[in-house]
Amino acid sequence: MDCRVVVEAGVPVYDVDAPDEAIRIAVSKTGEMLNPDLNYVEIDVGERTSPEGEELPSAFIAADEALVALELRMDVFNVDRAEHAGRIARKEIGQRLRNVPLEVLDVVEITGEDVESKSPPTNAGDPHEDPE
């Protein structure tokens, strides 16, 4: 089974004045940490809502420091369960984003047509097994 996993990251940004600036810096900083090893991970600005359903900004700023919610999306191939795909994605992303809190938001099974050609295989099977 192949899965598309969405992981939320809380990226800290320092010395910022505006939410737009914090978001721009967080996306850039995250891209630098993920590349070149995980250049197939898509980075999007996270969508936050209050318990009442009110839309909240993706960046929270206090004392010129911000915490920015980003959503990182990657495809994981050859897994047994969706839970396993979430753990693999969190581990792969977490190894590059040190000291950044991560939470798996969504895991969706994908079909062959949904798989993007730019995503290299992330096999969860036998490490000695040839992925081809």
Image (tube, grey):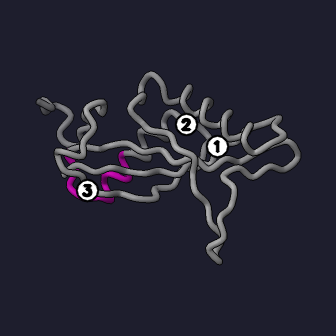
Q: Are marks 3 and 1 in contact (CB under 8 Å)?
A: no
Please rate how many residues cluster around mark 2, counting C-alpha atoms within 10 Å: few if below 14, some from 14 to 19, many from 20: some
Magenta region, mostly helix, strand or loop?
Answer: helix
Does residue 25 sit above or below 90 in this rendering? above
> Contact (CB < 8 A) between labels 1 and 2?
yes
In the rendered image, which residue does mark 3 sit on?
Answer: 109
Question: Which residue is at a point 62% across and 48% down the rendered structure image?
Answer: 10
The residue where tag 1 is placed is 11
Graded by Cα atoms within 10 Å as few (under 14), some (14 to 19) or many (20 or more), the crowding at tag 3 reads some
- The mark total stands at 3
Query: What span is colored magenta in the figure?
Result: 78-88
Mark 1 is surrounded, within 10 Å at the Cα level, by few (under 14), some (14 to 19) or many (20 or more) other residues, namely: many
Q: Residue at point 61% right, 30% down?
A: 28
Which dot marks residue 107? none
Amino acid carrying label 3: it is: Glu
Work out whether 97 lies above or below 8: above
Residue at disc 2, secondary structure: loop
Q: Which residue sits at x=62%, y=41%?
A: 99
